[in-house]
Amino acid sequence: MEPANHSSLPLWVVIKNIHHRMRMTEGLARITSSLGIPLSLDRYTEEHLGTSSFVSIDIKAECDWPGCIPFYYGEEQNETKVVLEYAWIPISCPSCKLFGHTHDTCEANPKNTQKVREIKTNKKKENNQAIKSKTMSQDEMEGWSKPKGKGGPQNAIK
Ligand SMILES: [Zn+2]
């Protein structure tokens, strides 16, 4: 079932490759805030913050579902990228900013309201071509004498 007309949905997200500087709830909140509103870390994550975390985020429909998010740390602003995996990516409409339908099936999409159906009519051309007989007429037959076959093998008397 697809959710109908929700602007946000609580979804589980796996966050991997978390830098040791980020292994704290604030660091995770910083990542998840770019997706939506972090709801909770599961018990395992709270007790054993490691390189991967399993978090529930109230994700907005306009989320672009990034596969990774760059994170800068330290005075030198070193870059590390956290990897994001989603248990479920529901369909969403970027126009309405709602889950439950796509832009292609959106009622606000002008393509769907002004749909012009082109009915192709196939006009069959009738072939009235007269079949011309190529049989010889009686006049053309005259003047020709049938060979009577004198001495032919069919008249040979045995
Ligand atoms: Zn829509």
Image (tube, helix red, strand yellow):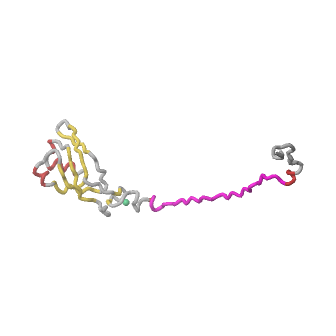
Q: How many marks?
A: 0
Residue under the image location 24 percent in, 49 percent down: 85
Q: Quadrant of the C terminus?
A: top right
Reply yes or no: does residue 128 show up in magenta.
yes
Q: Is residue 17 left or right of residue 63?
A: left
> Relative to 148, does residue 7 appear above or below in the rendering?
below
Q: Is residue 28 left or right of residue 61?
A: left
Toward which corner of the image does residue 151 lie, by quadrant? top right
Image quarter where ligand 1 lies: bottom left
Residue under the image location 17 percent in, 42 percent down: 19
Residue under the image location 81 percent in, 46 percent down: 154
Residue 124: x %, y % from top left: 63, 58
Q: Quadrant of the N terminus?
A: bottom left
Q: Is residue 131 left or right of residue 58?
A: right
Residues in magenta? 111-137
Reply yes or no: does residue 79 show up in magenta.
no
Which residue, as the protein is rendered here, is positioned at the far top? 76
